[in-house]
Image (spheres, rainbow, N blue to C red):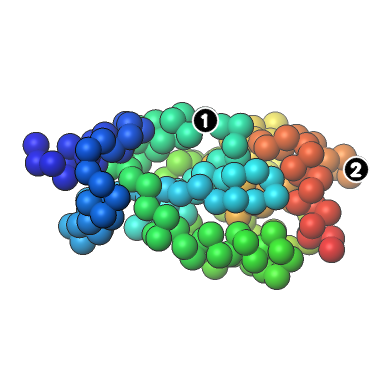
Amino acid sequence: MSELDRHLAEAARGLPVAGPPAEAIDRLYARAEEENLIDVAYAQVDSPLGPLTVAATRRGLVRIAYPDRALDQVLERLAEAVSPRILEAPARLDPIRRELEEYFEGRRKRFDTPIDWALSRGFFRRVLQTTARIEYGQVRTYREIAAGAGNVKAVRATGNGLGSNPMPVVVPCHRVVRTGGGLGGYTGGIERKEFLLALERG
């Protein structure tokens, strides 16, 4: 195993990359990028909802996690479901970091970053793809999302799918409410759902 491979393996397991000074670490990241050795890049992004862990593959955004989800758990799940070749590479996440900043400042109403749906399958993926089409400032009911995903009777399963949404904010599950207007649940807690809906109401 080369030194580069060893450092990548340590980073993928969430271990601190020991030994080299900062310049060597920068060279390590650059070389890993050049040789396409990073399958999943991640970074921390500040937000009004706390620091978000954001991860992307070459295909697009794959994960956004609220701070109550431990970083090592997020990375472990990505390693299992996508690839163990994970490295903290903030520059790779610059586009989505800018979009999130603009969104929270009220200057962006649509995310342009492509999405990698690798963490969802079948009906749950259709639920998330239907949810991704809800316009800024609009809301839909769980029943409407279930119908859009192909099974109007699967309201409870729709709620479960939205509760495990791997990309909150960008895939706007906060815009899905109960029939009759109740807010329903939210993967990041009801206070965050209220904050996002209020932000979009202006």
Residue occupying the point 87% across, 40% down: 182
User: The disc labelled 2 sits on which kind of residue?
Assistant: Gly
Q: Quadrant of residue 20?
A: top left
Q: Which mark is residue 180?
A: 2
| Residue drawn at (74%, 66%) of the image | 106
Q: Which mark is residue 109?
A: none
Nearer to me, 197 or 153: 197
Look at the image and tell me in which quarter the C terminus lies: bottom right
> Mark 1 against mark 2, which lies toward the viewer?
1
Residue 1 position (above or below residue 93): above
How far across and down, in percent of the image, does residue 17 sit? 28, 38
Q: Along the horizontal axis of the image, is 53 left or right of 142?
A: left
Q: How many marks?
A: 2
**Is 192 on the left-hand or right-hand side of 81?**
right
Residue 153 point in image, percent of width and height: 70, 37
Q: Residues within 10 Å of mark 1 (few under 14, many from 20)?
A: few
Q: Nearer the viewer, residue 67 or 112?
A: 67
Q: Residue at x 55, y 51 (%)?
A: 45
Tell me which numbered mark, 1 or 2, is placed earlier along the sequence: 1
Are dots 1 and 2 in contact, CB under 8 Å? no
Residue behind mark 1: 70
Location of the N terminus (image quadrant): top left
User: What amino acid does circle 1 point to?
Assistant: Ala
Q: Is residue 200 left or right of residue 15?
A: right
Query: Quick check: can you spot residue 11?
Result: yes
Residue 155 higher or lower than 132, as above or below: above
